[in-house]
Image (cartoon, helix red, strand yellow):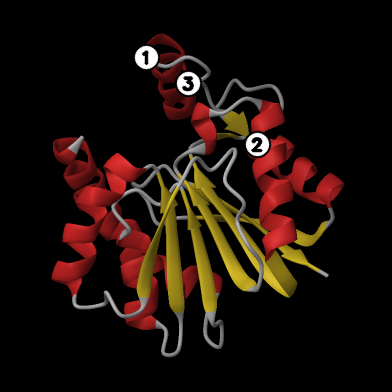
Amino acid sequence: TRAFVYAMHERARGIGSVLPHLIGVTGRRRLLDVGGGPGTYSVCMVEQTPGLTATVLDVPGVLEVTRELVDASGYADRVTLMPGDYLKTPFGTGYDLALLSGMMHRETPDSCRLLLSKAHAALDNGGLVIVSDVFFDDDSKSSPPFAVYFALNMMLTSDEGSAHARTEMARWMGEIGFVDVQTKELPKPNPHTLVLGTKR
């Protein structure tokens, strides 16, 4: 677990360095980082956003390692850890940002909708949800090639894993009540895409 969490930390550093600039988080106060693993995105976002605090939700074994990384970052006073199962643990309320990064590909469509619903309930009006993942381009689920290979790998190595289409993620957001739903590409060669929605 420790080796995996540290590997995810190194992988996330590049995305974390550009994430605040892509989504415009200036003025935001509270971030919920769902399935946040090493807490790298939370640290990057509080580092670049004055006044922002973050809560990282993940399983206890992962958060033992997250604590090491957050303490070493110098931002332990602004990043708190919430042990739990994101499908079962209440998210709380009062957030104006919710980040779900790199975990929806492990979940079924029903679980994805559940997580989006929980994020919607946790956000204040005007709050922003950000889903970052490897997505198919559309509902045909035939492109891009990387997403096809990624989905096949997830199918072979996890119980429920695959990949979802950005179009269906956007549709689920709209059905749950998010508005102004949009997608943004991360800088190449990173294969992740952001799907964003606002609670009104």
Question: Mark 1 or mark 3, which has the lower sequence index?
Answer: 3
Instruction: Identify the image quadrant of residue 146.
Output: top left
How much space separates mark 1 and mark 3, taking CA atoms?
10 Å
- Callout 1–callout 3 Cβ contact below 8 Å: no
* In front of the other: 120 or 59: 59
Q: Position of residue 62 (x, y in %)?
A: 29, 43
Q: Secondary structure at mark 1?
A: helix
Question: Mark 1 or mark 2, which has the lower sequence index?
Answer: 2
Q: Is residue 75 visible?
A: yes
Q: Is residue 186 left or right of residue 1?
A: right
Q: Amino acid at mark 3?
A: Ala
Q: Secondary structure at mark 3?
A: helix
Q: Is residue 124 above or below residue 180?
A: below
* In front of the other: 39 or 129: 39
* In front of the other: 41 or 37: 37
* In front of the other: 188 or 134: 134
For mark 3, what is the residue? 151
Q: Which numbered circle lies on residue 112?
A: 2
Residue under the image location 45 percent in, 47 percent down: 35
Q: Is residue 99 above or below residue 133?
A: below
Q: Which numbered circle lies on residue 93?
A: none
Q: Which numbered circle lies on residue 157?
A: 1
Q: Position of residue 164 (x, y in %)?
A: 60, 30
